[in-house]
Image (cartoon, grey):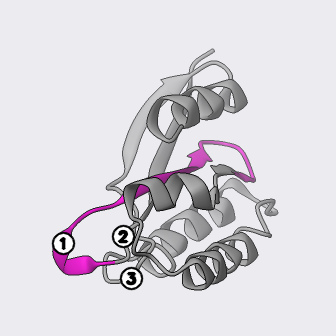
Amino acid sequence: MKIKYQYIIIRYRPFYTRGEFVNLGILMWVENFSKLFFRFDKNWERVCTFLPQVNKQDFLCGCLDIYESLSTTTFCTAEEAYERFVSLQRTIFGQDNCFPSSHVHVGCCDKPEEKLLELYQELVL
């Protein structure tokens, strides 16, 4: 049975005006599930390869904030999970900060956990 999902790509963009970014992770909401799924890579060496002038401490502090924001990924209802997904996209991953998200992508799959890993490998690693 196909299950609907939505996901955003979490990015690191330290210099807003330059528009350069590195994809760091995937946050996924799955219809009828009362949890959010995510994979996140805070590999400093990878980021430094693309953006060598970035401050390591600023980057790691931002990553810690993201982990804290995603520490609660299980909710009582699927609606609560979706509300959190939308809230995170607007606040933590808003377009005016160093960790913006992509626009929302949608799809259908049989196994959400496997699809998350597939997206992570394709879009982040």
Q: Quadrant of residue 125?
A: top right
The label on residue 18 is 1
Residue positioned 25% across, 78% down in the render: 16
Above-or-below relation of 114 to 70:
above
Magenta stretch, residue numbers: 15-37
Q: Quadrant of the N terminus?
A: top right
Give the spatial CA distance, label 1 vs label 3: 13 Å
Q: Secondary structure at mark 1?
A: helix
Q: Which residue is located at x 40 percent, y 62 percent?
A: 101
Give residue 2's position: percent from left, percent from top: 57, 19
- Given the image, on which type of amino acid does mark 2 rest? Arg
Question: What residue would you read off at disc 2?
Answer: 13
How many numbered callouts?
Answer: 3
State which tag comes first along the sequence, 1 or 3: 1
Q: In whole angstroms, how far apart are the C-alphas of marks 2 and 3?
A: 8 Å
- State which tag comes first along the sequence, 2 or 1: 2
Q: Earlier in the sequence, mark 2 or mark 3?
A: 2
